[in-house]
Image (cartoon, rainbow, N blue to C red):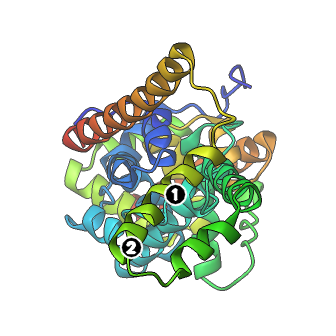
Amino acid sequence: MTFREDQFYINRILQGDSSAYAAIVDKHKEMVFTIAVKIVRNQQDAEEVAQDVFVKAFHALATFKGDAKFSTWLYRIAYNTAISATRRKKPDFTVIDDKMIDNYTTDEVIRLVNEQSVDEQIDAMNRLMDKLPEDENLLLTLFYKKERSIEEISGITGLSASNVKVKLYRIRKKMYLDLQQCFQIS
Amino acid sequence: MNNINTEHIDDDFLKKLVGQTKEETPSADFTSRVMACIPQTAATPESIDKPMVKPWQWLLLVAAFAGIVYFIYSVDFGSFFNLVATDSPEGQVNYLKTVTSAMQIFSQAFSAFKFTNISLMVVISLVALYFGDRFLKGRATEANQNFA
């Protein structure tokens, strides 16, 4: 399904045609749901959070000034709503021991992983990502799976761009270590 | 911002692995459930802040009020009521006189306003523009709904 620019639908909604909001929901529901499910870690709760996000965004649409991209504005609402739904403060990122995770070479891990079947790789990645803290899982997904830019991730999470980069660098290292341990032990 | 250096985190292998993981998708009826919570007509973001009486309606109300006040002050109601109250055998004639004098009073009250051909054309044009605008807006809304 092809969509027009967000601003086209926003203008129609602000002119009183609220049915145009269905296109906005269709266009962004997967991303909003992904953010929600990474934070709340439960499909059913994530659906409720995502629904809440879209209702909130609709009522706040008149306050959207267009300074940032609409998608970033919407995903920021999703991130904050999901964080609020978990009823705790924004989590601190896990401190990673750099000495420990430097005990491998990237090429070794890549070779080890490539020796496994695709199903085993997928299964391992799903398990390892589920074990990650919510924010790390979200950052990993946004950058490597959804291929969002650093500045967009910064806009969504409220972290500075340099902070996002540092965290992604550490998460990447951690993933390599986990992959190494996962396949060596198995 | 677009030229942020991502050299140390760009990783095609990790991108491939993460890309293979399960897709997170909401249920099939997600959009319809959201839309069920969205006000469909009155409570759109714009209409929430809309005044109930539009500025041009206020102008119309003020003009109507001024017209009524002008009418009341310019008409000699005393002679009118005296004529109606007269109890004579020619009751039916009196009734006709009453209606005629009421019409005269009304026309006298607004005799100060002269409608030239040009002003009449302007009034007719404004009325035509107003209804034309309403018609086109209605067509546009209908077309948008069909598109959606």
Density class for disc 1 (Cα within 10 Å; few <14, some 14-19, many ≥20) is: some
**Residue A6, above or below B119:** below
- The circle on residue B29 is none
In what quadrant of the picture does the C terminus of chain A appear?
bottom left
Q: Is residue A152 left or right of residue A178?
A: right
Residue A147 position, x and y percent, is: 48, 37
Q: Residue under circle 1? A: B101
Question: Tag 1's secondary structure?
Answer: helix
Residue A119 position, x and y percent, is: 20, 55
Direction front: furthest residue:
B89
Q: Nearer the viewer, residue A48 or B42?
A: B42
Q: Can residue A176 be seen here?
A: no
Identified at 69% across, 45% down, the residue is A155
Q: As shown in the figure, which amino acid type bears the numbered disc 1?
A: Ser
Density class for disc 2 (Cα within 10 Å; few <14, some 14-19, many ≥20) is: few
Residue A49 position, x and y percent, is: 48, 74
Q: Which chain is indicated by disc 1?
A: B
Q: Which chain is indicated by disc 2?
A: B
- The circle on residue B37 is 2
Identified at 71% across, 50% down, the residue is A167
